[in-house]
């Protein structure tokens, strides 16, 4: 609940200023205001350039929500209303840069895995993995929906699928842990000159990882590594999967570069 005397922050995109004000009156509903009829009287105290704040503070007020509470960096905005407030730290000294960069990356990776888990359960996920392998230069055959004999996708380099390497793929659209039985079952269908690949949105148990490490022709890809592959080959995706995973390229600060 917003009370009279509370500070409010409004980041303006038009002039790239952060406006800080104080609530001076009670809530009212104004029907004359199209689109934004909910009103609280505010006295604007100060307009501060965005460069005055740390990256963490700027990221916090960049929420997509119309109204939200500033929690983590509230003291920074309160201090900005003072005439003798300290200048923002340099980029090299701003310890929030790494945190902001990490959070953007984490949010993106979580979004990708969540969309795949919600929209591509079962056979559609096998089709997606087949498409991903296509973007990596493989030709693929995806098993028909239904019993697949333990192999969801067969990948190969040549047009007919006779020349090695032949890769047999089992996919798991679960977000949990895939154990040794599932990995062993696929490997039992892999010939001596073939390769096995298990792909999951989740993780693998320690036993499954140990089993795969002992097999030179068996590879496991968990959700985290799958996202790496998706980001690396996203530009080659067809429109169907780009619509499912609407991403755009952005640049974020690299904290490592600041220390070079």
Image (cartoon, rainbow, N blue to C red):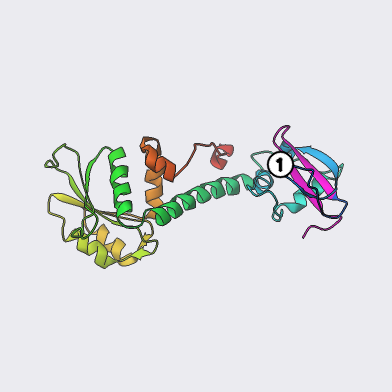
Residue 17, quarter of picture: top right
| Horizontal side, residue 207 vs residue 154: left or right | right
Q: Residue at x 22, y 63 (%)?
A: 184
The C terminus: image quadrant: top right
Residue 17 lies in magenta, yes or no? yes
Q: Identify which residue, 219 or 227, lies in the foreground.
A: 227
Percent position of residue 157, x then y:
19, 39
Residues rendered magenta in the picture: 1-22
Residue 247's place in the image compared with 73, above or below, is above
Q: Residue at x 80, y 44 (%)?
A: 20
Percent position of residue 221, x then y:
33, 53
Q: Which residue is mark 1?
A: 89
| Horizontal side, residue 219 vs residue 191: left or right | right
Q: Identify which residue, 105 or 35, lies in the foreground.
A: 35
Percent position of residue 161, x then y:
14, 42
Question: Could you tell me if residue 42 is visible in this image?
Answer: yes
Percent position of residue 132, x then y:
32, 43
Question: Could you tell me if residue 86 is visible in this image?
Answer: no
Q: Identify which residue, 122 or 193, lies in the foreground.
A: 122
Q: Identify which residue, 173 or 221, lies in the foreground.
A: 173
Name the outermost residue toward the top: 15
Q: Secondary structure at mark 1?
A: loop
Residue 3 lies in magenta, yes or no? yes
Number of marks in picture: 1
Residue 255's place in the image compared with 203, above or below, is above
Name the outermost residue toward the front: 31
Residue 82's place in the image compared with 216, above or below, is above
The N terminus: image quadrant: bottom right
Mark 1, other Cα within 10 Å: few <14 / some 14–19 / many ≥20: some
């Amino acid at each position: 609940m917003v009370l009279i005397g509370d500070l409010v922050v409004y980041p303006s995109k038009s002039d790239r200023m952060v406006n800080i004000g104080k609530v001076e009156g009670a809530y009212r509903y104004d029907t004359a205001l199209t689109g934004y009829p909910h009103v609280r009287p505010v006295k604007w105290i100060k307009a501060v350039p965005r460069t005055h704040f740390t990256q963490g503070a700027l990221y916090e007020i960049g929420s997509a929500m119309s109204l939200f509470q500033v929690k983590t960096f509230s003291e920074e905005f309160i201090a900005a209303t003072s005439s003798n407030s300290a200048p923002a730290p340099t980029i090299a000294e701003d310890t929030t840069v790494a945190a902001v960069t990490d959070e953007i990356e984490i949010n993106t990776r979580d979004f990708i895995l969540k969309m795949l888990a919600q929209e591509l359960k079962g056979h559609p996920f096998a089709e997606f993995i087949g498409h991903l392998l296509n973007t990596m230069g493989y030709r693929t055959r995806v098993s028909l929906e239904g019993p697949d004999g333990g192999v969801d996708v067969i990948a190969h380099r040549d047009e007919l699928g006779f020349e090695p390497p032949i890769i047999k793929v089992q996919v798991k659209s679960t977000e949990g842990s895939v154990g040794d039985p599932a990995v062993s079952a696929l490997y039992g269908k892999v010939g001596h000159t073939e390769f096995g690949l298990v792909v999951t949105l989740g993780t693998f148990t320690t036993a499954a990882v140990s089993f795969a490490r002992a097999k030179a022709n068996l590879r496991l890809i968990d959700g985290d590594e799958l996202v790496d592959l998706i980001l690396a080959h996203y530009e080659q995706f067809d429109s169907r999967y780009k619509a499912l995973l609407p991403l755009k390229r952005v640049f974020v600060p690299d904290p490592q570069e600041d220390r070079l």
